[in-house]
Image (tube, rainbow, N blue to C red):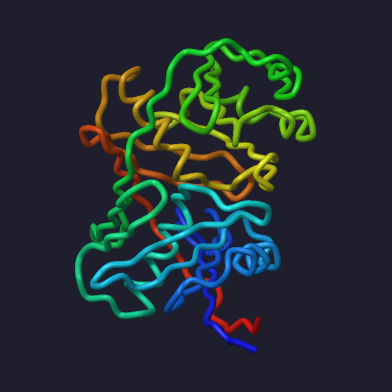
Amino acid sequence: MQQFPIYQVDAFAEERFTGNPAAVVPLTQWLPDALMQKIAMENNLSETAFFIPEGNNFAIRWFTPAVEVKLCGHATLATSHVIFHHLNYVAEEILFSSKSGQLRVMRDGDLLVLDFPADNYTAAPTPVGLEEAIGAIPAEVYKGKTDYLLVFPSQEMIEALRPDLRKLSELPVRGIICTAPGKGVDFVSRFFAPAAGVDEDPVTGSAHTTLTPYWSQRLGKQAMHAIQLSKRKGILRVKMAGERVHIAGRAVSYLIGQISV
C-alpha cells in the first residue's frame, strides 16, 4: 500500500465554501494513469491535480471523475497555492509543463495569477439540439478549441438557465460556456461539461481563456472583472497579455490529509 499527501483547496474563492474546490496530490513520479483516474473518481470533485518535480519546475496533470483533461485553471491555481503556502516554495513564480504547453503562475500580493494561452474561437453554426438542451436561444455562438461559447443578452438569462444535462452530454464537445454582460462586473458566465463528468463547474479557469479574448474585443478593455454564477460563485480578474491570458484569483485551504492506494 502506498500513501500520498492530499490537499483540498477552494480556488477563485474569497473565503471557504466558495469558489471551486480542487484536490491536489503531490507525487515524486507519475502513478499509472488508471490509478490517478480512480483517485479522481474517489475524490469526486470537478478536478484532481497531480504534480511532480521537474528540475526546478513542475509537471502537472488534471483528471475529472471521468476523464483526463488537457487544461484546468482552478486546479492549477489550487496546486500553486499548495506549492507556495504548504511546500514553502520561495520563488515568485512557478513554471508547469502540461499537455497544453508551459504554464506560469505568479504571485501578485495575495492573488495568484495564471498565465495561460488564449483560446482561438470562431463563429459557428448552432449544433443540432443545443438550444433545446440549454433551454434558451443564444444571441451568438462560437466554437473554441474544446468548448462552445454561447453569448446571451443579460445576466438574468444566465442565472435562469436550467439545461437538460443528459442532452448536453450527447453533444460532441467538452463543455458549454454561457456568458452575458454582468451587473457590477464586466461579464458573467456559467459552464456545463456533463460529457466530461462535470454537470456544472463552480469556477472554470480554462473557460476564461475563451471568455477573456471575446470580452476584451467586445468591450475594448484589456483588464476585466468577472463572476462565474454557480451556486458557490467564483471571482476572477482577467487580462489579455498578447497571445496569453492572465487569470487571477485567491485560494483558501480546506483540507490537508493522506490517501492510501
Front position in the image: 246 or 128: 128
Q: Is residue 112 above or below residue 132?
A: below
Q: Is residue 201 above or below residue 57?
A: above
Front position in the image: 232 or 191: 191
Residue closest to the far front: 32
Query: Could you tell whether 65 is left or right of 246 in the image?
Result: right
Q: Is residue 19 above or below residue 222?
A: below
Q: Residue 107's x, y, as percent? A: 25, 60
Q: Residue 108's x, y, as percent? A: 23, 57
Query: Could you tell whether 81 is left or right of 88 in the image?
Result: right
Task: Quarter of the image for the N terminus: give it.
Answer: bottom right
Query: Could you tell whether 102 is left or right of 38 in the image?
Result: left
The residue positioned 38% from the left and 67% from the top of the image is 81
Query: Could you tell whether 142 is left or right of 107 in the image?
Result: right
* Residue 165 image-quadrant placement: top right
* Residue 121 image-quadrant placement: top left
The residue positioned 65% from the left and 28% from the top of the image is 172
The residue positioned 32% from the left and 59% from the top of the image is 96
Count of marks overlaid on the render: 0
* Residue 86 image-quadrant placement: bottom left
Q: Residue 235's x, y, as percent? A: 44, 46
Q: Residue 202's x, y, as percent? A: 58, 47
Task: Quarter of the image for the C terminus: give it.
Answer: bottom right
Front position in the image: 30 or 151: 30
